[in-house]
Image (spheres, helix red, strand yellow):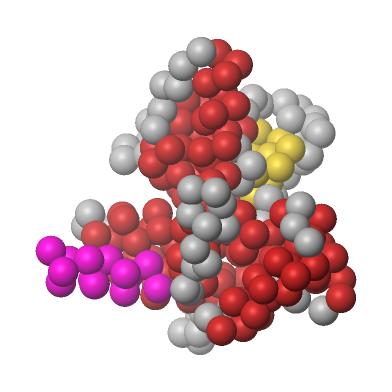
Amino acid sequence: EAQTIEFISRYMRWDETQARSLVRSAQEHDLEGLLDNPQTLHMLLKSVTQDQPQFPTSKLETYQRACATLVQEHNEAHMAASGHVLLTDAQVLHAAGYLCAVMLLSGSASIAKQPSQQHPAGVLVLRTLLANQPNTPTLGACQEAVQTKLFAGTGSGRFVPRHRTVAEYLAANYVSERIQAGLPLTRVLALVQGEDGGVVPALRGLHAWLAVAAGAQVRENLIA
């Protein structure tokens, strides 16, 4: 707990009282499980911004706000460097979800923008991945996505999701959108389940987030 308090204080540039207040808020909202892991703690802190100082009330809201912040930071930096932004945050998040879904479902190790003989097995090359594939994000959107803080460079021209849990969340959002657009649920289940009908261990996080994403869309439809 002392390390968590110190991490929050340094990261947010807060005093200890403010850091302890955030910890209490997390506990009150049943989010204290996010405090014990550096990756999920980072996501929680990213969800608390100047624009949204109110504490998130759920794990879903935490990831929604954190991912929106990470993409927005990239677009602001991109606009400062180039003078304009060609893609919306939603388009970049959509592309990131697609890439995360393909990586998780195929068991791929990383993503590369360009082909290279130096790439090991299990690397997805964007141009090859997107070639002649209908209903996929544009190459430009995918290239922008891997440049955001949602992904991390490996130093060898390849990119990996910065956080496994974020990749699972984004992938589930993308797959859920495809299901809503007509992708058969049985086809999705065939990808995430093993021969015994159980969920493949490596895809349990994606499966759990998929249930949450589907539930959120059902609620939105009922409200509409």
Image quadrant occupied by the C terminus: bottom left
Q: Is residue 130 left or right of residue 126?
A: left
In the depicted view, which residue is nearer to us: 66 or 195? 66
The part of the image, by quadrant, that contains residue 164 is: bottom right
In the depicted view, which residue is nearer to us: 138 or 183? 138
Q: Is residue 106 magenta?
A: no
21 lies above or below 99: below
Q: Residue at x 62, y 83 (%)?
A: 27
Span of residues in magenta: 212-224
Q: Position of residue 206 (x, y in %)?
A: 51, 68
164 lies above or below 99: below
Q: Position of residue 104 (x, y in %)?
A: 57, 58
Residue 192 visible to an observer of this rendering: no
Q: Position of residue 44 (x, y in %)?
A: 62, 63
The part of the image, by quadrant, that contains residue 137 is: top left
Q: Is residue 20 left or right of residue 191?
A: right
Q: Is residue 221 magenta?
A: yes
| Residue occupying the far top of the picture | 83
Q: How many marks?
A: 0
Residue 86 visible to an observer of this rendering: yes
Q: Please name the predominant secondary structure of the magenta segment in the image.
A: helix
210 lies above or below 183: below
Q: Residue at x 31, y 40 (%)?
A: 135
Q: Is residue 171 left or right of residue 156?
A: left
Q: Residue at x 86, y 71 (%)?
A: 3
Q: Residue at x 71, y 42 (%)?
A: 152
